[in-house]
Amino acid sequence: MDEVKKQTLAVLVDNEAGVLSQVTRLFSRKGYNIESLAVGVANDPTTSRITIEVLADDDHTVLLCNQLRKLFPVHSVKLMTHSTSIRRELVLLKVSTPTSERRNEVIQIANIFRASIIDVSVGSLTLAVIGDEQKTEGITNILSEFEIIERVRTGVVALERGNITIYDETKEKGEFNYGKNVL
């Protein structure tokens, strides 16, 4: 049996009510918990791009991709590997800064991680961090020593490097290419 690991899938779908529910129900029916989910309108306003992270082995990932392709509102499915894609997430952190010394320490850490300070109040700073999982986890771990009041994450978004796009293998271009370029 293959190693279970975090797999990232990019799914191009119709931008219509109920489509996200259809896609997420597929994972639920197959017994997979979605670890991360990000959705937004694509280049064409009639389509949306869903980025899903799930814990699965390679064989089950191929099966999930093929099942997704069978859904009517799905145009394209791509596996986003770490070596061929750029992956980022946004994390907002509200950190307690009861003293000016604490505030200065948090500002220095924010500068090291190239985080943006997006709100300053009397007792807290709010930071925005954009990066890969190692970066966002790194700053979160360091700032946990300063009392993180609140944290929110967007979920991972990913694009393939170079000229390759999710539009390269849509159903319209190559009707149901099962297994082709999935892994």
Image (spheres, helix red, strand yellow):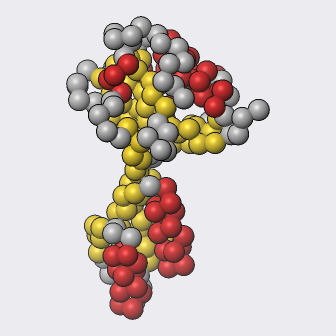
Residue at 66% across / 34% down in the picture?
A: 57
Quarter of the figure that contains the N terminus: top right
Residue at x-position 31% and y-position 39%:
162
Question: Up-down: is 92 above or below 4?
Answer: below
* Outermost residue toward the left in this view: 44
Q: Position of residue 103 (x, y in %)?
A: 37, 84
Residue 94 at what x, y percent from top left? Answer: 41, 68
Q: How many marks?
A: 0
Please identify the residue farthest to the right as the structure is shown. Answer: 1
Residue 23 visible? The answer is no
Estimate the x, y position of residue 165 in percent, counting from the top left: 33, 30
Of residue 79 and residue 74, the one placed in the foreground of this image is 79
In the rendered image, the vertical position of residue 144 relative to residue 65, given as above or below: below
Image-based side of 89 in relation to 26, left or right: left
Q: Is residue 115 above or below residue 4?
A: below
x and y percent of residue 135 in the render? 46, 63
Taking the spot 51% from the left edge, 25% from the top edge, the residue there is 182
Q: In this view, does 49 lie above or below 114?
A: above
Q: Quadrant of the C terminus?
A: top right
Q: Which residue is drawn at 29% across and 34% down?
A: 163
Which of 147/2 is in front? 2
Q: Is residue 86 visible?
A: yes
Q: Which of 8 and 100 is in front in this view?
A: 8
